[in-house]
Amino acid sequence: MAVEKRLAFSIVQFLRDQTHCGALNSDEQESLEVAIQCLETTFKISSSDCHLAVPQPLTEIFLNSLLKNDNITIPETSPSPEDIERAEQLKNEGNNHMKEENYRCAVECYTKAIDLDLRNAVYYCNRAAAHSKLGNYTEATGDCERAIGIDPTYSKAYGRMGLALTAMNKYPEAISYFKKALVLDPENDTYKSNLKIAEQKQKEATSPIAAGLGFDMASLINNPAFISMAASVMQNQQVQQLMSGMMSNAVGGPAAGVGGLSDISSLIEAGQQFAQQIQQQNPELIEQLRNHIRSRSFSGSAEEHS
């Protein structure tokens, strides 16, 4: 029964992690909590039974098992010393290309290194970073999976997986990988910072205000480029007239509660009108803002490569 209890404890841990990821609605959250209670009652376990915990999270165990049966084949024989030396040279060349922001050449170098030494997780992880710089996030996550399959304790692979998933707007998954990276490297400030970014983006993605306006308002407000461009737009006479009308409605407009900005929905509607006006007056501004937010670098973007 000890094995079954440890398995049940791992399942409960996994379910608890899902309830904290912020991606579930209230009904789904309640269903998981009921499932947790049922498992704890059936197997007579509780969250305080730390002795039942296993070294790896259930998702990591599953991923490792999956990768073993995947198309990723690691040769039984080791590469020759000459191949290992040449692979390291190619890796270093790739690192230099990364510093020069020549990402396509970096991918080529890392690929050649991988061809010579399929067992080295660093090569896959470095190629993942180059793919991310090129916007090839699917390829980046694939390389991170390969690196983790080779070395499940390689924290940088989890961190780079988190970055790629964040760029793909898969925030719950990104949060999970950043947390795994921190389990392996608890003092890493880059992982901590990127985890906070992913968590903030997850909150913004589920925010009705952010959804209504169509872009990341928190990022814009703190963005110097936005402040500069917004100041330029505000010089437009039609935009000034629109803002004047909005303020009139808000302060002394028709009954300031009958057709005025009397609730948050009215404020959102006014904001949408303002955004539409900016779009009409300066469509390039909106596109610049969107591109700027999409390309905003994470704190891990300048990290050194192995």
Image (tube, rainbow, N blue to C red):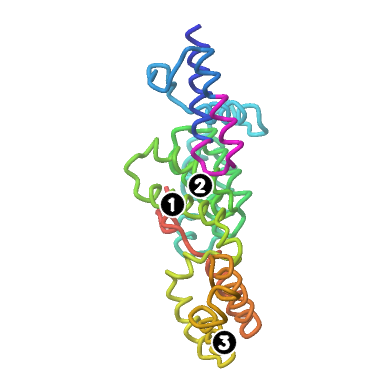
Q: Identify residue for label 2.
A: 162
Instruction: Please give left or right for residue 292 compared with residue 192 in the image.
Output: right
Which residue is rendered at x = 48% and y = 51% of the image?
Answer: 198
Residue 239 got which mark? 3
Alpha carbon distance from label 1 to label 2: 8 Å
Structural crowding at the residue carrying mark 2, measured as other residues with C-alpha within 10 Å and reported as few (<14), some (14–19) or many (≥20): many
Q: Earlier in the sequence, mark 3 or mark 2?
A: 2
Q: Nearer the viewer, residue 40 or 106?
A: 40
Is 20 included in the stretch rendered in magenta?
A: yes
Q: In the figure, residue 99 lies in which quadrant?
A: bottom left
Alpha carbon distance from label 1 to label 3: 37 Å
Q: Secondary structure at mark 2?
A: helix
For discs 1 and 3, the disc positioned in front in the rendered view: 3
- Residue segment shown in magenta: 19-35
Residue 194 got which mark? 1
Q: Nearer the viewer, residue 115 or 185?
A: 185
